[in-house]
Image (cartoon, rainbow, N blue to C red):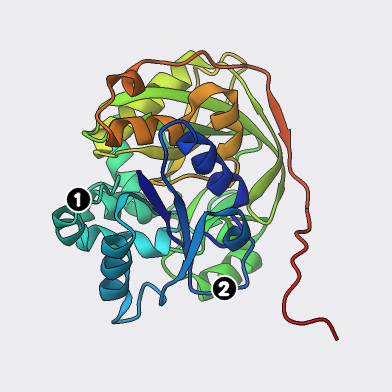
């Protein structure tokens, strides 16, 4: 079985996890990106350059690659490409390619933070309230509604800061600032959208939107609610849910957003026992073992650090 990972860039842990998962059953991991000077190229079995997802040739090139490489499982990793890929789902299916993404309408709910807020409110999932009055008490928590990821999320301390932020992000979602612990919940769904298992991990020392330190913490109520949320959203495969947790038991929490893809530190949950790459490959092969819950190592921590990859290129001078 061959797996293609789009926008692979420097997602070395994810590529390695899929390679490890394929060791027993055979198959190759193909990393794809718009650039060829990316680390994933050197840890995958093969590499293929693709145009940007907004390029008119993207769909044709991707389908050609999937056909040539006999790809069975396609793993998206970037929010900006998901709607394009979801639109290609019928053509991919004709080639026998499994794409673990929801419908375009369900994607819109995940990718638009204001739509996600409305969804949670309508379906009674706990979520931070929206501050509509610009004269509300500070500090506030503001994010662009679409795109920009966590890079646009910021604390707003006064009216001047709010006015500056809104000038740059007129569609911003403004909510009360919360200083409680932020958690990521890695949620594994079946290819039919059935909830399978979740792992909650506390986020610490956020650098460029990702945790430089994270630790798995067993919070049953939070994990079950995350599974229920992903099921209601119609999600498939691996997803990440973000939430603020207001108490030590994890029974009082507020959802922030959902990303229908692997996250930057999902490798911690994979290593702790969730084993999403292995189980996605099993699902694609029709192996029911993928549906059974796995033993999770609670208290497992990850410390992220920069690492260099040395590759000799060109002739020696």
Q: Which dot marks residue 109?
A: none
Q: How many marks?
A: 2
At 30% from the left edge and 31% from the top edge, which residue is drawn?
283
Give above or below for 65 relative to 202. below
Q: Is residue 102 left or right of residue 141?
A: left
Give above or below for 297 relative to 255. above
What is the CA distance from the residue labelled 1 to the residue labelled 2?
27 Å
Q: Position of residue 106 (x, y in %)?
A: 24, 48
Report which residue position mark 1 lands on.
96
At 45% from the left edge and 63% from the top edge, which residue is drawn?
147
Q: In this rendered view, identify the residue nearer to me: 69 or 109.
A: 69
Q: Position of residue 145 (x, y in %)?
A: 42, 60
* Quadrant hosting residue 119: top left
Report which residue position mark 2 lands on.
36
Q: In this rendered view, identify the residue nearer to me: 94 or 27.
A: 27
Q: Is residue 36 left or right of residue 73?
A: right
At 62% from the left edge and 67% from the top edge, which residue is drawn?
38
Give above or below for 219 relative to 143. above
At 33% from the left edge and 19% from the top edge, which residue is drawn?
289
Residue 126 visible to an observer of this rendering: no
Which structural element holds mark 2?
A: loop
């Amino acid at each position: 079985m061959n797996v293609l990972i789009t926008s692979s860039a420097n997602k070395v842990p994810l590529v390695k996890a899929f390679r490890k998962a394929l060791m027993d059953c055979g198959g190759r991991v193909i990393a794809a990106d718009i650039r060829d000077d990316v680390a994933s190229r050197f840890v995958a079995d093969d590499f293929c350059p693709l145009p940007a997802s907004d390029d008119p040739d993207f769909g044709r090139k991707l389908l050609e690659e999937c056909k040539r490489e006999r790809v069975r499982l396609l793993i998206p990793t970037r929010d900006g490409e998901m709607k394009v890929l979801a639109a290609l789902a019928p053509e991919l299916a004709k080639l026998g390619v499994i794409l673990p993404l929801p419908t375009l309408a369900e994607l819109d709910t995940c990718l638009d933070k204001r739509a996600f807020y409305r969804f949670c409110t309508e379906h009674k999932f706990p979520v931070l309230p929206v501050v509509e009055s610009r004269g509300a008490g500070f500090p506030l928590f503001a994010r662009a509604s679409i795109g920009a990821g966590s890079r646009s999320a910021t604390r707003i301390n006064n009216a001047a800061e709010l006015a500056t932020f809104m000038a740059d992000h007129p569609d911003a979602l403004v909510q009360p600032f919360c200083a409680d612990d932020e958690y990521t919940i890695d949620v594994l769904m079946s290819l039919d959208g059935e909830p399978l298992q979740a792992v909650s991990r506390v986020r610490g020392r956020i650098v460029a939107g990702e945790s430089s330190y994270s630790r798995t913490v067993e919070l049953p109520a939070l994990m079950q609610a995350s599974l229920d949320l992903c099921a209601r959203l119609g999600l498939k495969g691996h997803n990440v849910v973000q939430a603020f947790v207001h108490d030590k038991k994890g029974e009082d929490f507020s959802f922030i957003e959902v990303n229908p893809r692997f996250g930057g530190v999902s490798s911690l949950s994979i290593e702790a026992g969730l084993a999403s790459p292995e189980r996605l490959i099993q699902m694609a092969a029709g192996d029911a073992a993928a549906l059974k819950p796995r033993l999770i190592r609670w208290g497992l921590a990850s410390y992220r650090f920069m690492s260099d990859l040395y590759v000799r290129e060109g002739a020696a001078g």
